[in-house]
Image (cartoon, rainbow, N blue to C red):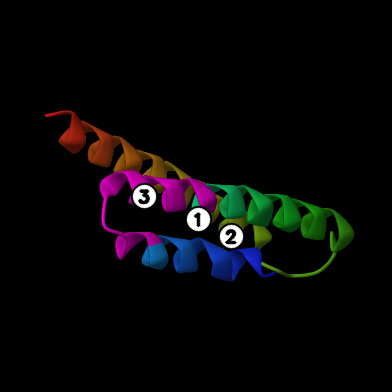
Amino acid sequence: MASCLSVPSNIAEGSERMSDKEFIRFLNISLGSLVELKTQLSVLQRLKSGAKLPIENWLGKSEELYVQIHAFKAKLRMSNAK
């Protein structure tokens, strides 16, 4: 699942940009990749219903990360509004 590598990669790349506006753009890309990952995990969960994979845990962690990225975006926007 390439999307699981895309999330932190886009955050890292965005953090090196010259403006918060550009960083926010990369955070949005990482959110898209995170939603893609959640979809892939949900499909995997349906296909491997008998397998002992911690998919529920992964889905929970991805939701936590989703909330954290949104909160970080809001903080960046507020710091630029001042």
Region rendered in magenta: 14-29
Marks 1 and 3, the one that precedes in the sequence = 3
Q: Position of residue 51 (x, y in %)?
A: 81, 69
Q: Nearer the viewer, residue 65 or 76?
A: 76
Mark 3 Cα-neighbour bin, 10 Å: few <14, some 14–19, many ≥20: some
Can residue 80 be seen? Answer: yes
Q: Quadrant of the N terminus?
A: bottom right
Say which residue label 3 marks: 22
Magenta span has 51? no
Examine the residues drawn in magenta and state their main secondary structure.
helix
| Amino acid identity at mark 2 | Trp
Q: CA distance from mark 3 to mark 2?
A: 28 Å
Instruction: Give the residue at x 31% y 60%.
Output: 17
Q: Is residue 37 above or below residue 35?
A: below
Q: Is there a contact, CB below 8 Å, between mark 1 and mark 2?
A: yes
Q: Quadrant of the C terminus?
A: top left
Q: Position of residue 75 (x, y in %)?
A: 24, 38
Magenta span has 17? yes
Identify the image quadrant of residue 2. bottom right
Instruction: Give the residue at x 51% y 61%.
Output: 7
Q: CA distance from mark 1 to mark 2?
A: 5 Å
Marks 3 and 2, the one that precedes in the sequence = 3
Horizontally, residue 51 falls left or right of residue 10, namely: right
- Labelled disc at residue 61: 1
| Amino acid identity at mark 3 | Glu
Q: Nearer the viewer, residue 46 or 18?
A: 18
Q: Is residue 61 above or below residue 16?
A: above
Say which residue label 2 marks: 58
Q: Position of residue 77 (x, y in %)?
A: 27, 35
Direction left: furthest residue: 82
Q: Secondary structure at mark 1?
A: helix
Horizontally, residue 74 falls left or right of residue 42, namely: left
